[in-house]
Image (cartoon, rainbow, N blue to C red):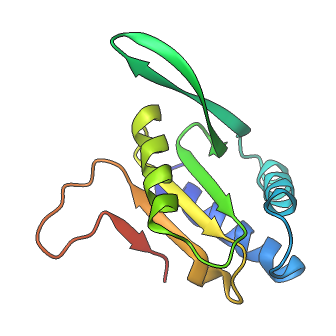
Amino acid sequence: MSINDITQAVIGMAIEVHRRLGPGLLESVYRACLVYELRKRGFDVVVEQPIPVVYDDVKLDCGFRADLLVNRLVVVELKAKSAIHPVDKAQTLSHLRLMNLRVGLLINFHEVRLVDGVHRIINGYEQAPGNTLITEFE
């Protein structure tokens, strides 16, 4: 299964969870339901994946954790807040860099339409004039 297939499936299942529950609940509720949906469909999901920082060849446990790691390829960060801030996108990108992964999703369940809260984050994207590092789901 390709990274694009995984991200498409995660987004679809997140939309289904949001459609059934609506906005306004805690992040932990959305996380539990999304994990359930992903595992029900055969995805390998690690919850609260520890992310070490490697500094001078030493692994340091600094307490970083990815909300979800799907099929060992895609980091999924979940939020349930009024607005996504640049620091949320930077955090997701930092997790990707530290885990040496290419693609992550930042999903904010506190939106009337979930698609407005889905952000695809790319690690190592070669920026050219007019291109952006972070793409919005449309």
Q: Is residue 122 left or right of residue 37?
A: left
Residue at the bottom extreme? 112
- The answer to which quarter of the image holds residue 98 is top left
Q: Nearer the viewer, residue 113 or 138?
A: 113
Query: Residue drawn at (47%, 64%), measured in percent from left and top?
Result: 120
| Spot occupied by residue 65 in the image (x, y as percentages of width and height) | 63, 37
Residue at the left extreme? 129
| Spot occupied by residue 107 in the image (x, y as percentages of width and height) | 62, 67
- The answer to which quarter of the image holds residue 17 is bottom right
Query: Residue drawn at (61%, 53%), measured in percent from left and top?
Result: 76
Query: Residue drawn at (48%, 83%), measured in percent from left and top?
Result: 138
- Tell me if residue 5 comes above or below residue 95 in the rendering: below
Query: Residue drawn at (54%, 47%), measured in percent from left and top?
Result: 74
- The answer to which quarter of the image holds residue 110 is bottom right
| Spot occupied by residue 25 in the image (x, y as percentages of width and height) | 86, 72
Q: Nearer the viewer, residue 48 or 81?
A: 81
| Spot occupied by residue 47 in the image (x, y as percentages of width and height) | 74, 40
The number of callouts visible is 0
- Tell me if residue 125 comes above or below residue 102 in the rendering: below
Q: Is residue 64 left or right of residue 39?
A: left
